[in-house]
Amino acid sequence: MPELPEVEVVRRGLERWVAGRTIEDVEVLHPRAVRRHPAGGVDFAARLRGETVGVPQRRGKYLWLPLAGRDLSVLGHLGMSGQLLVQPADAPDEKHLRIRVRFDDAAGTELRFVDQRTFGGLSLHDNTPDGLPDVIAHIARDPLDPLFDEAAYHLALRAKRSTVKRALLDQSLISGVGNIYADEALWRARLHYERPTATLTRPRSAELLGHVRDVMNAALAVGGTSFDSLYVNVNGESGYFDRSLDAYGREDEPCRRCGTPMRRRPWMNRSSYFCPRCQRLPRVVS
Ligand SMILES: [Zn+2]
């Protein structure tokens, strides 16, 4: 599943390659890819015809294409294996091509939604007054958003009867932080993933948030990371960069700070990677 930096890389690619282009035709090749559009593929295609794509937007891991001059957006669900590719119109169809969007210009490229497992898809939504597709109105701003309310976040975090990793993945508090970047930021902050949020002082939670931003920005700088070989960015290039990970996927490898073998523990149907020496739970929780 792509994380925020990968989705931002895709968004930037779409901004470069499809913003401002007018849709000539949409071809839905698999009904599951438009199952979130209840009126179906024919309606989906008819409503997009003649519309112009605005500047692609992202919040957390959600990505959407606003339609210029309309209070409507096309929301992209990448799911586990979804890809948005900009391809030359004469390139052979991908085996798992689900939706094709042609444009009425001479640029020679088209937008393709390719998805092997068909958990993802595209759907059309009304916008909220803030310009968000209505179905994601409850998603909090992400830490790279200039309007992210940091003071409110620290207060909400301390008030929450939760543990720190759970809170990092709570999309109503902060969006876009997935398992990989949570483990990386917790390692950098020397915090155990089960640390109760109520025990975090304001400076500690501010430090943690700083690490979350740093790991995401580092990933963005190299084009995002991904652990799903099916995932590639909008130009079809993989953004794999596991060499720079300090915690995630490093079970039994030495901690890059203290040399202690890293551990992996099952956590909410996933895994948590941590250093048992640098990231201890406080003995007394007060
Ligand atoms: Zn360590």
Image (cartoon, rainbow, N blue to C red):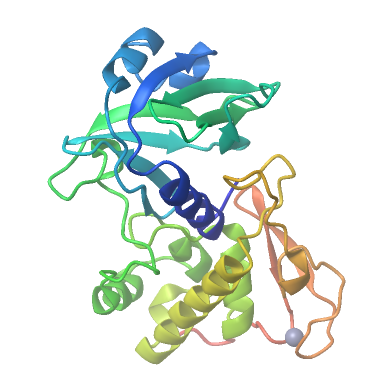
**Residue 193 seen from this side:** no
Nearer to us in this view, 155 or 242: 242
Where is residue 245, by image quadrant? bottom right
Nearer to us in this view, 15 or 166: 15
x, y percent for residue 180:
63, 61
Residue 219 vs 231, above or below: the answer is below
Q: Residue at x 25, y 72 (%)?
A: 149
Residue 233 vs 248, above or below: the answer is above
Nearer to us in this view, 257 or 195: 257
**Residue 118 seen from this side:** yes
Image quadrant holding the N terminus, namely top right
Q: Residue at x 44, y 64 (%)?
A: 167
Whether residue 19 sits left or right of residue 100 in the image: it is left
Image quadrant holding the C terminus, namely bottom left
Q: Residue at x 35, y 26 (%)?
A: 23
Where is residue 252, by image quadrant? bottom right
